[in-house]
Image: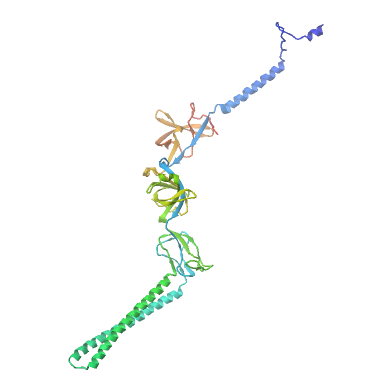
Amino acid sequence: MADLDRLRIPRDQNGAARPAPRSRGRRYVLAGLALLLLIAGGVYLVRTGWAPEVNTTVASRIYPSQALTLLNASGYVVAQRKAAVSSKSTGRLAYLAVEEGSRVKKGQIMASLENEDLVAQRDQAASQIREAEAQLAAARAELADAAKNYQRYQTLVAQDLVSRQEYDAALARHDKAKAQVANAQALVNSARAALANAQAALEYSYIRSPFDGVVLTKNADVGEVVAPFGAAATARASVVTMADFDSLMVEADVSESNLDKVRLGQPCEIALDAIPDRRFAGEVHMIVPTADRAKATVMTKVKFLERDERILPEMSAKVAFLSRPLEPREAKPRLMIPAAALLSDNARHYVFRLEDGRVRRLEVSLGEQAGDLVEVTQGVEEGWRLVLKPPAGLTDGSRVRVKE
């Protein structure tokens, strides 16, 4: 009977079965698990729960023109006056005085062809002029003598002191001397024309600069044959290519839909990728009266209002079309931050700088405001990461997490 009583299920007063008492070991296991969970949660809270998530921004230098920009366009720097300079006659290049980057003046000799024969022809023509002039001088002397003799015979024949035949001979001599003078003068003119022709032929052997400019490329070397049009297979058509740097402009493509924002004389600001530390003032010089059907754009030429030796043809450029001209104080970039990064306390302004997961509270001095941006004149340096919209309770030295 005792064994049967041990097999009986214990029940409460209502007859329901009662659970068996938990073992002591099970309670220890559950308590250990709870303790581990508490420790893990504490570690997580220490590492993350106490560090609020924040957004950040970067202090950067921004040109004030960005607030005045109506339209942006990209293009390239193009010289409006450029030339591929070649010779007017065919010959072998004997002299070359320029190279890439050489600055030349209008009329300066940049190269020359072999011209010894042309120099000889010029010298011969000059000698013929001197010979003709000497003949003219002799003819004039003969005319002067014949004229005096003729005048004497006019007086003598009137007094019947000489025969009519002698008078006629004096007259004939005078007329002949006049004809000789005219012939000598014609020879002089012919010799001068021959000299001009020889001088022109010699001049064609010199290759001169057509305008003030800079040599861009050198296409031939001494010893090569050059020709006006490169007709021969081995002849070079041009010796150098050059451009007038004073005629540099930016040719930018403007979308047809934005063409109403562009007008002649409109102030612009030009930024060159090759010169990132400076922006150049410009204005719209020309709106080319035709559109590109394939790109649905219209070419706009923007001229530089200031020159810089670093500006070169074919540089890529970006043009900002402005609503008004920039003032002198607006020509330089300013250190700007979003207004949402600022905190104010009794007319003082602060920002939180992010450093190695913690923030530092810094007092700053402010300048002008441009839209959502504020100029910082003191307290912040370019490139610093700042907390955007600092949460309440953030203090100097607080640990924060940056939102991804």
Query: Where residue 102 appears, x then y in whole percent?
Result: 45, 60
Q: Residue 190, relative to residue 102: is it above or below?
A: below
Is 16 displayed left or right of 89 in the figure? right
Depth check, front residue: 371 or 22: 371
Q: Residue furthest left?
A: 159
Q: Locate residue 357: give its quadrant.
A: top right
Is 298 displayed left or right of 41 in the figure? left
Depth check, front residue: 93 or 283: 283
User: Could one spot residue 214 in this view of the protein?
Assistant: no
Identified at 40% across, 73% down, the residue is: 199
Q: Residue 382, relative to residue 303: is it above or below?
A: above
Depth check, front residue: 207 or 33: 207
User: Could one spot residue 339 in this view of the protein?
Assistant: yes
How was this image coloured? rainbow
Query: Where residue 343 appears, x then y in whole percent?
Result: 44, 30
Q: Residue 199, relative to residue 379: is it above or below?
A: below
Query: Where residue 140 appears, x then y in whole percent?
Result: 29, 83
Depth check, front residue: 268 or 366: 268
Quadrant containing the N terminus is top right
Identified at 40% across, 63% down, the residue is: 106
Quadrant containing the C terminus is top right
Q: Report the label total.
A: 0
Q: Locate residue 325: give its quadrant.
A: top left
Query: Where residue 242 appears, x then y in whole percent?
Result: 45, 60
